[in-house]
Structure formats: structure tokens, C-alpha cells
Image (cartoon, rainbow, N blue to C red):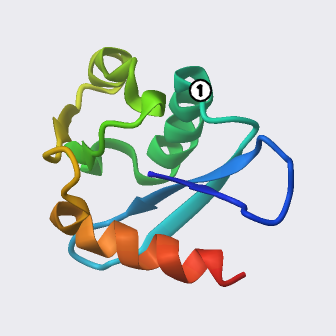
Amino acid sequence: DTVLSSRSESRSCLVTFVERKTRLLWAIKAPNRTAKALNTAFGKFIGAFGPQVKSITVDHGKEFANYQALEQDYQIKVYFCHPYSPWERGSNEYFNRRLRWF
């Protein structure tokens, strides 16, 4: 998921990943919310976790428009939650809310 700052006019954002079992949060700064920037951030995430990542669950944001590249480049499965259903990714939404405090 991505977290935007409400305090600045900057286009940069944080791309967040939450590991399901341990609830470990990874936040990587991206220059914008494009699919290309997300793929670059995901590459950094995969660099840390490697082949242990089997799948990710994402929302329907524009940054996931090129999800096929993630599936092909990293041999993972990308699942989408239902539209307007943030509770299906509750851990990620919880951590994103906490990050906005800072």
C-alpha cells in the first residue's frame, strides 16, 4: 500500500509492506505513486526477504496497475482485496494509520 503525506506538496510517498505472520512492517520511500516506482520499491523488499515471499494482497490503487510485472519478475501471486474493503488488509491499514502520525 502507499501512504501520502498530508503536510506537504511533495509527490513522494511511502510504500508499505506488512508480513502477515510476524506483522513486520517495511516502509520504503518512493518518488511518486506510479507503477514503476512501486515495482522498484518491491524489488528492494524482495532483496531483503528473497524467495520467502510467495504472494501479496493489494488494493485497487493506480500504483498496482502493472501487477503482472510483479508476478512475472518475482514469481509471486498478486491478490486483490474487494473494492472499498480495507478490513481485508487490516494489518496494513492499521500500520499506515500509525505512520501518518509521524
Residue located 33% across and 23% down the image: 67
| Image quarter of the C terminus | bottom right
- Report which quarter residue 90 is drawn in: bottom left
- Report which quarter residue 41 is drawn in: top right
Task: Give the camera-side residue of 90 and 6.
Answer: 6
* Residue, disc 1: 34
Q: Amino acid at mark 1?
A: Thr
Task: Give the camera-side residue of 56 and 5.
Answer: 5
Drawn side of residue 64 relative to residue 102, left or right = left
Drawn side of residue 19 relative to residue 49, left or right = left
Drawn side of residue 14 relative to residue 51, left or right = right
Residue located 61% across and 35% down the image: 33
Q: Give percent across and percent down for residue 4.
A: 65, 55
Disc 1 secondary structure class: loop
Picture layout, residue 38 above or below residue 94: above
Picture layout, residue 78 above or below residue 4: above
Q: Give percent across and percent down for residue 46.
A: 45, 43
Task: Give the camera-side residue of 73 and 102.
Answer: 102
Residue located 18% across and 40% down the image: 80
Task: Give the camera-side residue of 48 and 6.
Answer: 6
